[in-house]
Image: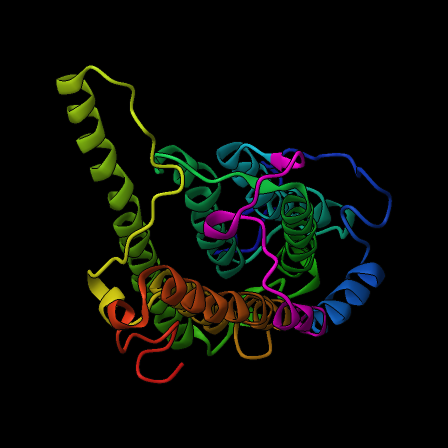
Amino acid sequence: MSAPQNQPSVDYLPHLPNLVDTWYPPSREHWQLLNYAWQFFPLFTAAQWLTTFYPSGKTSIDSKLNLPGKWAWCFMEMPGMLTVLYCLMTIPHQEGLRTIPWANWTMAGVYCIHYFYRAILCPLLNPTMSPIHAFVFASAFCWQVMNGLVIGGWLAGYGPTSVFDWSGKLYTIEVGLILWGWSFLGNIFHDDDLREIRRSALRRQKEQAQKENKPIEGVEKLYMLPKNGLFHYILFPHYLCEWLEWAGWWMIGGWSCTPARSFLLNEISTMLPRALQGKQWYIEKFGKEKVGDRKAIIPGLL
């Protein structure tokens, strides 16, 4: 029996074994439980409003539990993408599905593009990265696995499974893709503006070191106030662009797509307190006058 027209067959994908029976990948019953529970993750992020402890990036600390920044970042950001791909290579077979709709693959594709950039390209492009505490690494790793299971299960067979499930959604898919694409480019632009601060400082240090025949000081903990793009109005435009990315991704999946909605709300609840605390960090380091009227994450508002 051939695959239905206009739906890509999963027969060409490798059939991977179940690593943890009924959990990784999840059975339909366990996926429903995970999908429901994941909606309540913002309740746990409330603890971030009570403490400024976040031993990573500009607020990293000296600790024996620190991990090398680039390697830690890569391995804590990658599990979500790998889990989604793993679900796509296991769940359709166990559900007896021959095909997965193109829209499912579209959502999986843009999700993986984002995390390929985040997990692999970012550590390669960044001149340096501050150490990441083992607690942050473990928390992010678990978050990614859980998010990957919820999203992967929905895309691989527990959500829409035919073109009829996507009927009438073409325009929201197109608008969502446009919003996702431009926001992704905005994310890259503002990330690179931050990278350029250290790249240019490192170039100056190398030139100075050659002239004076002395070692390079390093730029691991070098921070400045960027001014390009949305940095003129807010201090964390890369956060805002990422929220807009996943808002567009939610539009692609449809407003009833619980995993996409949970993903966006979980990101906002995690990143918002960090952005507001980050603004206070900038004020303490550079002074209120230099920070000026810039908001933390939403121009003119917050």
Where's residue 210, x and y in %?
16, 17
- At 34% across and 65% down in the image, what residue appears? 237
Front in this rendered view, residue 100 or 279: 279
Residue farthest to the bottom? 301
Query: In this rendering, is residue 167 above or below 69?
Result: below
Q: Tell how many labels.
A: 0
Seen in the picture, residue 261 relative to 87 is either above or below; the reply is: below
Point out the residue furthest to the top here: 213
Q: Nearer the viewer, residue 259 or 278?
A: 278
Q: Position of residue 293 (x, y in %)?
A: 27, 78
Left or right? Give the position of 55 relative to 179: right
At 58% from the left edge and 39% from the top edge, which residue is drawn? 62
Q: Does residue 97 appear in this view?
A: yes
Q: Please indicate whether residue 300 sits to the left or right of residue 53 in the image.
A: left
Looking at the rendering, the stretch of residues picked out in magenta corresponds to 42-66
Does 199 sit left or right of 48 as displayed? left
Magenta segment includes 51: yes
Is residue 1 among what the camera can see? no
Q: Is residue 222 above or below residue 34?
A: above
The quadrant of the image that shows the C terminus is: bottom left
Q: Is residue 191 magenta?
A: no
Q: Quadrant of residue 161?
A: bottom right
* Colouring convention used in this rendered image of the protein: rainbow
In this rendered view, identify the residue nearer to me: 234 or 248: 234
Residue at 63 percent of width and 50 percent of height: 140
